[in-house]
């Protein structure tokens, strides 16, 4: 994750230095072509993905001097976060990244110096606090430089694109006692017996029962949906789906469990203001984290395809956290 500023600057000068071994040629190139820039800005965005195995981590940032000679005097450089540039980046790149939240990051220094005779500032650390990131999605942080020296405008701003994944689920499951199912595409009313197959069996706390879409009197294909009213608005970080297992072997069934799904959230059950797609493996338990946690009372799960590409789907238990 961490880039060595000196190495990055040296690489940037490699082409210039390799053009000729003649020191007289370099001496005759004017210093007016020299520029200051952020080496991290070469990649736009500069992407960093972390696992939340610690409370925080850091990214190296800094500034470099590119020219035929090292600077004759110190060059002072200021670093500034400019959140207003996020909208411009999103518009230019057809993205929708939110800005990295205030309080989730800290620049080690807002100013530094490229010393006379050197080509870079000391490496500085951008500290990122994972507990302030409310989701596993990407956040954008523009960091720009200002200096009295000439700046390469294309490399003036680094757009740090940062995400942090969970290695395990730190959240408790919501209490489902008051939950209501407000809609579903279909259920099997008789084929699984009087106490199985219905949508409500995805919420009964029994991993041996399940909701399955209709298969006996009719065989409706996907998409299949189930909509939940949690009865109270709360911050939704993700869902936990328990798949149906084989009665004989206890292993997860080869067909029927959700594969390609869409999760939507709503505060009132009418306006669905968040949508995210997921592709699930055929595991007994799939834990999915929303890219950005949402305040929600309702959530709707749409299953577009099932494992084994069968027409029906089934869920043994549906939880949220």
Image (tube, rainbow, N blue to C red):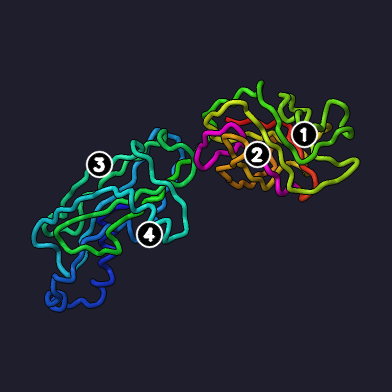
Quadrant of the rendered structure where residue 54 is?
Answer: top left
Q: Secondary structure at mark 4?
A: loop
Say which residue appears at 43% left-offset and 38% top-offset: 133
- Give the residues drawn in magenta, as a range: 286-307
Q: Residues within 10 Å of mark 2 (few under 14, many from 20)?
A: many
Q: Residues within 10 Å of mark 1 (few under 14, many from 20)?
A: many
Q: In terms of image quadrants, where is residue 313?
A: top right
Q: Which residue in the protein does label 2 denote? A: 300
Residue beneath disc 3: 108
Q: Which secondary structure, mark 2?
A: strand
Image side of residue 150 versus residue 263, left or right:
left
Is label 1 in a helix, a strand or a loop? strand
Q: Which mark is residue 43?
A: 4
Query: Does label 1 or label 2 sit earlier along the sequence?
Result: 1
Question: What residue is at 12 percent from the left and 62 percent from the top?
Answer: 71
On screen, residue 300 versus residue 115, left or right, reads: right
Where is residue 280? Give x, y as percent. 65, 44
- Return the residue at label 1: 211
Of tags 1 and 3, which is closer to the observer?
A: 1
């Amino acid at each position: 994750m961490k880039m060595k500023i000196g190495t990055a600057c040296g690489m940037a000068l490699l082409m210039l230095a390799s053009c000729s071994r003649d020191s007289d040629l370099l001496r005759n190139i004017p210093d007016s072509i020299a520029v200051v820039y952020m080496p991290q800005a070469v990649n736009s965005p500069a992407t960093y993905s972390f696992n939340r195995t610690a409370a925080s981590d850091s990214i190296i940032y800094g500034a470099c001097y590119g020219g035929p000679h090292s600077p004759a005097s110190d060059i002072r450089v200021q670093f500034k976060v400019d959140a207003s540039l996020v909208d411009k980046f999103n518009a230019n790149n057809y993205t929708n990244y939110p800005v990295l939240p205030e309080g989730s990051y800290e620049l080690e220094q807002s100013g530094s110096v490229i010393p006379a005779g050197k080509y870079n500032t000391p490496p500085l650390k951008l500290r990122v606090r994972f507990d302030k990131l409310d989701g596993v999605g990407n956040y954008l942080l523009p960091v720009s430089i200002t200096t009295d020296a000439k700046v390469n405008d294309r490399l003036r701003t680094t757009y740090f694109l940062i995400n942090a994944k969970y290695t395990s689920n730190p959240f408790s499951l919501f209490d489902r006692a008051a939950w209501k199912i407000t809609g579903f595409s279909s259920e099997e009313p008789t084929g699984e017996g009087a106490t199985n197959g219905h949508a409500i069996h995805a919420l009964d706390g029994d991993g041996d029962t399940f909701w399955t879409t209709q298969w006996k009197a009719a065989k409706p294909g996907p998409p299949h949906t189930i909509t939940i009213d949690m009865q109270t608005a709360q911050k939704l970080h993700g869902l936990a789906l328990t798949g149906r297992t084989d009665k004989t072997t206890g292993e997860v069934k080869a067909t029927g469990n959700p594969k390609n799904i869409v999760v939507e959230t709503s505060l009132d059950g009418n306006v669905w203001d968040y949508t995210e797609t997921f592709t699930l493996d055929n595991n007994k338990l799939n834990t999915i984290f929303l890219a950005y946690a949402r305040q929600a009372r309702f959530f709707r799960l749409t299953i577009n395809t099932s494992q084994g590409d069968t027409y029906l789907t089934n869920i043994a238990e549906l939880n949220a956290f």
